[in-house]
Image: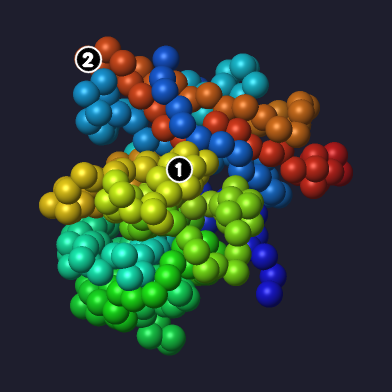
Amino acid sequence: MPRRHDVFRIAGVVLALCMAPGWSQPQTPAQQETENYTIRTTSRLVLLDVSVKDSQGGFVSGLTRDDFKVYEDGKPQKISQFANADVPVTVGVIVDESGSMGPKRREVILSAIEFIQASNPHDEMFVINFNERARRGLPDIVPFSDNIDQLRAALWEGAPEGRTALYDALEMSLHQLDMGRRDKKALVLISDGGDNVSKHNLTEVMNDVLRSEATIYTVGIFDEDDPERNPGVLRQLAHVSGGTASFPRRLDEILPVCKQIAKDIRTRYTIGYIPPIEGKPQRHIKVVASAPGHAKLMVRTRTRYLFAADNQAAEAK
């Protein structure tokens, strides 16, 4: 089966942005938490999915292009595309249904439903349930859905039992995500982070995450004495992809965490620029934001990418 692609569908993104209310035509210190990804396109356009919070951790909306600065390898870049609209995305909800999750299942599923209800109603969503094997929650003829009843039924599919195939579930989710029509993509994973039966390993998963377009949000649900817990994996997945890792201490904290994730996805900015042909293959990105009334703004996005060789060859023709 072919591996998932690295291609950013630029034309689709630009069209979606032009149709969005927050679109603006091209015109002319923050904290960042992310890693590499590869961009292979016929147009040298780098698109960044950007989250901005204030010093109290609140989401900052209403910023304009002029409030952002983008640097590649320390050199300022001209922002050529910008949007702050709430555009629909492709989202996968991945729910751990191994035996250890049994006592927490009700709160987890209700929180996942709350996430769906708080998301953009035009998002295309899917559900992956997993214990000893990963499986799609929706019917085979329904790859994606925005129907809350269908998605609710998908979340309740199955029963908590057996061991944990987390890495297989992530591989299935990334493959499913690639088939989505939306240009912005996200995964929400609710699990203890442990894996004890997958056919895939963590190295394979992380390589595919770096090749994907997904922003991954993880919610760690485990007891402190749980031998299967692995919060490090959950942090790594979120850090590499530009998402967040949350670890609610009580079951009643899962629901507000899921609502917060929905808000994060809906309030992200899209920033695009055309990088220079000259330069090293691996390029470092820094995005900073500042605006009147905000002493410090914290930016979260990917911080490195690979300028693929086929880009340079195409531009040389």
Q: Mark 1 sits on what residue?
A: 232
Residue 292 appears in the figure: no
Q: Is residue 215 left or right of residue 108?
A: right
Please, is residue 234 above or below residue 100 in the view?
above
Closer-to-camera residue (218/192):
192
Residue position marked by numbered label 2 in the rendering: 293
Residue drawn at 55 percent across, 31 percent down: 303
At which x and y percent is residue 81? 49, 37
Q: Residue at x 61, y 39 (%)?
A: 36
Q: Quadrant of the C terminus?
A: top right
Residue 260, image x and y in percent? 23, 45
Q: Amino acid at mark 1?
A: Gly
The percent position of residue 12, horizontal first and vertical second, equals 52, 56
Q: Would you place residue 314 above or below residue 194 in this image?
A: above
In this rendering, position of residue 38 left or right of residue 225: right
Whole-percent x and y of residue 135?
44, 77
Residue 282 drawn above or below residue 191: above
Q: CA distance from mark 1 to mark 2?
A: 36 Å
Label for residue 155? none
Check disc 2 and give the amino acid type.
Gly
Residue at point 36% right, 24% down?
Answer: 298
Mark 1 nearby-residue class (10 Å; few <14, some 14–19, many ≥20): few
Which label's residue is closer to the chain start, 1 or 2?
Answer: 1
